[in-house]
Image: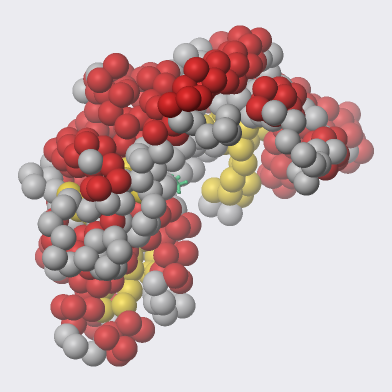
């Protein structure tokens, strides 16, 4: 049976993986732009042309087909002109580790399916909890920041309900969560999934740049209490998705302590600062959180998925424990991670971070994150110095928010250009940027996560943006009139 990876197919495995790696390596070696620019209709017809009900064509052919179908049209996050979302280029040791865990296929739900893997994951969690400053913390790997936030808010909900007394049904609709408008959308979605009231997420005022105002939080918590609500959690963000700014964690922790409210720090984006020698101080106060979200697949350059939830008090995780006779009966004393997780079968994603730390060292990863933060600051200067561009606020991490402001254009025209510029770039595949809305106005966004991208590369992206703006403005007859009159 050549289908399964077994002792008799070990050599075949080696050759197939190396064939696959050869295709990938060849693509990496000569990728000319971050995407092929093929239209959706073209891609749809390529996908539709594959007959998934046909007899097997053999692995080498199937892999060749993947090369022509997927690799030829993939989005390349390592390309210096890729600057759209928070998905990162990946470090080599993690990619090598990924092939190890895919082949062995352990499931880190129970100890008896992963043995040493469970111990390695727990050791890694201890290490990361130590970076956060949790003296005796705990946690578990998750599929991403969305799941980590949901998990943290679930634990906070259970703690708040337990504290409120036996009347679970009457407590639930009274629970409230505090966050700024810049917090990740998974906070609101979690509130929905957790059965909280529709008005359960209370928006706390910010400083105008997206950072939570501790005084406003203080007032909001007091007001909610006075109105008969039960403060369940405060979500502070260490690195907002758009602006890349960090809520004042220590002062927020003070407010939470005073009111006795669970502090969750969403450091999905900013977690790379944990290993930055130069910028670790930006996270001061995170050690006072009760739970923390970290996304290694954002600022630790890990392949998706690699994320974790950490808690300061290990016993907090018990709220999610559930026992099944076949898997983890209550009398079982093995260290079953399923007792701490929302998932059952779960990937050994920890191996990737483990190998990355052993291969590169934590300091090196911190330097890589520092490099993209430095790059974003210099890119911000470039935008600011360019009369055809307008910088929209300053980041503490690695995003650049800006607009194209062709001479003579008014704000409405500039707003209208944003979506068009993003689309023109996306359709060409030459440079990929994102768009978002800040203070009610659309703007373009670069998310810089490639430590090898240079300022010249960023200058190139900005030139492409300006060219697109000029072309689009030229297509608008109104613009031409304004241009002629100026
Ligand atoms: C990306 C992000 C998330 C969600 O993480 P996923 O890994 O995409 O699920 C949560 N919070 C913040 C601040 C983020 O930037």
Image coordinates for residue 484, horizontal then vertical, percent: 88, 29
The residue under the point 54% across, 20% down is: 12
Lateral position of residue 197 relative to residue 477, left or right: left
Q: Is residue 466 visible?
A: no
**Place of residue 129 in the rendered image (x, y in percent of width and height, measured from the top left):** 18, 42
Along the viewing direction, whichever of 56 and 380 lies nearer the viewer:
56
Depicted 423 relative to depicted 144: above or below: above
Q: In the image, what residue occupies the spot 70% across and 28% down?
A: 58
Which residue is depicted at the point 29% across and 68% down?
324
Q: Which residue is nearer to you in this view: 351 or 294? A: 351
Query: Eyeballing the image, is 268 above or below 220?
Result: above
Work out whether residue 3 or residue 374 is closer to the camera in this orientation and state it: 3
Position of the N terminus, as image quadrant, is top right
Give whichever of 58, 364 is nearer the camera. 58
The x, y position of residue 127, in whole percent, is 17, 35
Occupied quadrant, residue 405: top right
Percent x, y of residue 392: 52, 38
Q: Quadrant of residue 431?
A: top right
59 to 122, vertically: above or below: above
Quadrant of the rendering where the C terminus is positioned: top right
Most extreme residue toward the left is 135
Q: Which residue is found at the position 67% from the left and 22% from the top?
A: 60
Q: Is residue 167 visible?
A: yes
* Scheme by which the image is coloured: secondary structure
């Amino acid at each position: 049976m050549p289908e399964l990876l077994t002792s008799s197919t070990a050599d075949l495995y080696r050759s197939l993986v190396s064939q696959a790696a050869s295709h990938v390596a060849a693509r990496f070696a000569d990728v000319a732009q971050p995407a092929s620019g093929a239209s959706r209709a073209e891609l749809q017809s390529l996908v539709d042309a594959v007959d998934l009900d046909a007899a097997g064509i053999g692995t080498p052919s199937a892999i060749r087909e993947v090369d022509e179908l997927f690799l030829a049209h993939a989005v390349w996050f390592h390309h210096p002109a890729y600057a759209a979302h928070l998905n990162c280029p990946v470090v080599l040791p993690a990619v090598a580790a990924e092939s190890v865990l895919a082949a062995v296929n352990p499931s880190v739900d129970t100890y008896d399916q992963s043995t040493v893997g469970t111990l390695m994951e727990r050791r890694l969690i201890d290490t990361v909890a130590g970076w956060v400053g949790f003296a005796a913390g705990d946690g578990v790997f998750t599929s991403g920041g969305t799941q980590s936030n949901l998990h943290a808010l679930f634990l906070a909900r259970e703690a708040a309900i337990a504290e409120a007394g036996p009347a679970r049904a009457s407590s639930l609709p009274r629970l409230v969560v505090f966050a700024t408008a810049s917090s990740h959308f998974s906070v609101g979605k979690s509130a929905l999934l957790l059965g909280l009231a529709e008005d359960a997420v209370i928006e706390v005022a910010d400083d105008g740049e997206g950072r939570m105002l501790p005084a406003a939080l203080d007032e909001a918590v007091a007001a909610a209490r006075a109105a008969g609500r039960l403060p369940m959690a405060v979500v502070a963000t260490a690195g907002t998705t758009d602006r890349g700014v960090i809520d004042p964690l220590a002062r927020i922790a003070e407010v939470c302590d005073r009111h006795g409210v669970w502090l969750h720090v969403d450091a999905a984006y900013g977690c790379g600062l944990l290993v930055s020698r130069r910028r670790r101080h930006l996270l001061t106060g995170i050690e006072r959180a009760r739970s923390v979200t970290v996304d290694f697949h954002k600022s630790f350059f890990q392949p998706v998925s690699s994320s974790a939830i950490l808690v300061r008090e290990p016993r907090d995780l018990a709220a999610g424990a559930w026992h099944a006779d076949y898997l983890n009966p209550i009398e079982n004393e093995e260290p079953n991670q399923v007792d701490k997780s929302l998932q059952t079968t779960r990937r050994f994603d920890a191996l990737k971070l483990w190998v990355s730390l052993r291969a590169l060292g934590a300091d090196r990863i911190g330097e890589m994150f520092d490099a993209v933060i430095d790059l974003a600051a210099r890119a911000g200067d470039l935008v600011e110095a360019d009369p055809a561009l307008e910088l929209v606020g300053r980041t503490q991490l690695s995003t650049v928010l800006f607009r194209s402001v062709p001479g003579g254009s008014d704000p409405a025209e500039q707003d209208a250009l944003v979506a068009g510029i993003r689309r023109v770039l996306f359709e060409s595949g030459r440079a990929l940027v994102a768009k978002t809305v800040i203070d009610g106005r659309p703007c373009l966004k670069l998310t810089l996560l490639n430590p090898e991208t240079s300022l010249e590369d960023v200058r190139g992206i900005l030139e492409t943006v300006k060219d697109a703006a000029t072309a689009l403005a030229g297509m608008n007859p109104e613009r031409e009139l304004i241009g002629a009159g100026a």
